[in-house]
Amino acid sequence: MTKEEDKKRLEHLKGIVSNLPSKPGSYQYYDKEGTIIYVGKAKNLKNRVSSYFHKEVDRFKTKVLVSKIWNITYTVVNTEEDALLLENNLIKKYQPKYNILLKDGKTYPSICITKEFYPRIFKTRVINKKFGTFYGPYSHIGTMYALLDIIKKLYKPRTCRTPITEEGIRQGKYRPCLDYHIKNCGGACIGKQTHEEYLKNINQAREILKGNTREVEKLLFEEMQTLATELRFEEAEEIKKKYLLLKEFCSKSEVVSHTINNVDVFSVTDGENTAFVNYLHVTNGNINQAFTFEFKKKLDEEDKEILPIAIMQIREKLNSTSREIVVPYDIELPLKELTLTVPQRGDKKTLLELSEMNGKQYRFDRLKQAEKLNPEQKSVRLMKEIQQALKLPKMPYQIECFDNSNISGTDAVAACVVFKKMKPSKKDYRKYNIKTVVGPDDYASMKEVVRRRYTRLQEEQQPLPDLIITDGGKGQMEVVREVIEDELKLDIPIAGLAKDDRHRTNELLYGFPPMVIGMKTDSELFRLLTHIQDEVHRFAITFHRDKRSKHALHSELDDIKGIGPKTKDALLKTFKTVKRIRESSMEELSGTVGRQKAELIKTYFEEQAKERI
């Protein structure tokens, strides 16, 4: 598209915007081919649509949307509520490219009660309402099986698929199955259970599936009392068993007070390109529906923009008729028949926190699944987390960490480990013998190593790290900063990992002066940072041990000129110790290493003996 075409396009759109009414309604954006690419709602059409064409619009994706718009239409309605309903219907109909849309996942199972003469109750993933009434769907399979199990124990509905009729029972056409003989069925097919009694059980099962378990419990208790008053103790005992079973089930399944009835709970958890909206439906204190839905963000929508349209789509999808909705904050949802509640404490606050926890867990699970398929995604995520936590100018692709190791200043060494894309790059690890520091001075040793490391990288024009981490607190950070910024004039972010009194890493420090960065010590990012710290510590300690070991293996034979490693090994293999070599005769030594070398050895030990005298 040329500049002239774009100018004409914008002039055409601004002409439409200037004539828009200041009334509630829905607006539609079209692309060059005449396809609807975005549907929106507004309390004031003119103000809302004109906001897209302001120069100060800073959202990149919104700018992309505006660049695709070639035409605008709108529909005026009486109220904001009507605008919301119209928007929802148009989004469903046209599936616009830039609107957030409910992402359908797998089909969750439901529980069906058939419309047969003797209804059956079973789980299914196929919904066909002409065959029966469906309850659910159930995202948590355990909940569904718990409901089926309590219904089976209480009412023993038939499981056979035989089409039982009243006439067939009278004619004795049916034979009882194994379920009847093991007392898992009342035997309705052979007249052992009346049709009225069977339907009464099914109706109570319906109430349980609706979440009205407390009401069923109350009915059973009243029936038990009535039977006991009429001295029908055996029947009362059977009802008592059902009552106790249901009471136990209620105590396990009830999340909050049973006074909370027919309430929807919504929360939204933000992801990078996806919003996760969790939905709970609560009846009589029981959660009988729980789902987390994914909404693909198209224009970097904020949570407050996503939640209203998500509520509309989810309630319609699940046929919710609740008149109260619990949400985390005030939103614009102008539906008159609904009550919006933003709880601050109490049972509804507990439900909202439970919804938020489920949404976060679902996001975490989805992230883990994606990272298994694409391991690079995890590295990028962790780099972004560090960048956000420390407010770095760019993602820390290359991280370097330093550590010193010595014993009372002897055999002083240092190590540098390099992590690239959050993984160790062992070919870039470096070991350093401390050259200019005498005694146990960790700060001076750190200065020497950092100076040597980055002076060399500059001379060789090698890439510098995006982040330096010191194995220590404020003191180590300061000496590194003095070298990096004051001496070498480099701009490299410096962080530190500090330990507590028990020598456990418990703080991430950053900035000048260093400040503690708020981060949970059990988070994945903090564990990664401590892994980097452990890795540099391991590398430095290993190098230090190797150096000490070489000194420990040094013997007097190493000081004899003309005696190399092979000769030394041959002598030790024959004589075992330096003491025995010293005490051996010329003939014994000659037999092992030859006359010439034997003379060197004897001469050396004789001179050593004279010096001691």
Image: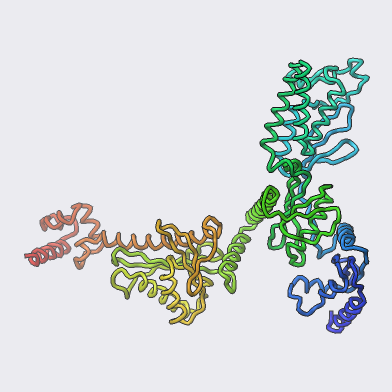
Give coordinates of residue 611: x percent, y percent: 9, 67
Residue 40 pos. (x, y %): 85, 65
Location of residue 584 (image quadrant): bottom left
What residue appears at the point 56 percent right and 69 percent down from the top-left corner?
390
The residue most toward the bottom is 4
x and y, in percent, of residue 326 in the image: 75, 52
The answer to which of 476 and 220 lies nearer the viewer is 220
Quarter of the picture holding the C terminus = bottom left
301 to the left or right of 560 = right
Q: How many marks?
A: 0
Return the residue nearer the eye: 305 or 553: 305
Nearer the observer, 600 or 295: 295
Q: Is residue 95 above or below residue 350?
A: below
Horizontal and vertical percent position of residue 91 = 86, 60
> What's the colour scheme?
rainbow
User: What residue is rendered at 72% in x and 27% in y?
Assistant: 243
The reply to whether residue 94 is visible in this rendering is no
Residue 605 in the image: above or below residue 158? below
Q: Quadrant of residue 297?
A: bottom right
| Residue 552 seen in this snapshot | yes
292 vs 523, left or right, is right
